[in-house]
Amino acid sequence: MEQEVNTNGTAPFLLIQKPQELIRLFERMIDRKIREITSLNLQPVQTILQGDSPFLTSKEVQQIFNVSRQTINDWRKSDILHSLKIKSRRFFFKEEVEHLKKKWNQSNPQV
């Protein structure tokens, strides 16, 4: 009987922990990250608009208008909202967002 040779040059993966312990560790890490993310998303819209920066992130614009990321991208592509891309991040001009928010509130009055 011939022994199979490892031709792809990788070493076998060695687990120090039992698979169930590893799963619990990952679950705790995921739960911790979810709690961290949800605590960050509770920032009020007024606080976002009163910051020092003249720019807003896509996430902040999403919170202000309560719309999806895709909607923000559609607005950007339709020239409704202009942005500035720096490396892989996209920023929106705060003044333009405030102006659009005023128009948004006039055309969509809350009942």
Image (spheres, helix red, strand yellow):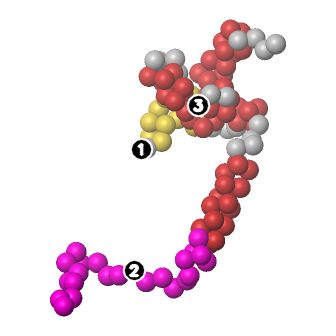
> How much space separates mark 3 and mark 1, taking CA atoms?
22 Å
Residue 53 seen anywhere in this rendered image of the structure: yes
List the residue tagged with mark 3: 68
Q: Which mark is residue 13?
A: 2
- Tell me which numbered mark, 1 or 2, is placed earlier along the sequence: 2
Callout 3, which amino acid? Ser
Whether 18 is among the magenta residues is: yes
Tell me if 26 is positioned left or right of 84 in this view.
Answer: right
Q: Main secondary structure of the magenta part?
A: loop
List the residue tagged with mark 1: 87
Label 3 SS: loop
- Tell me which numbered mark, 3 or 1, is placed earlier along the sequence: 3
Q: For the view shown, which residue lies furthest in the top direction?
A: 107
Give x and y (percent) for residue 81. Answer: 52, 21
Image: 35 above or below 71? below
User: What is the magenta range?
Assistant: 1-23
Callout 2, which amino acid? Phe
Give x and y (percent) for residue 34. Answer: 66, 55
Residue 92 seen anywhere in this rendered image of the structure: no
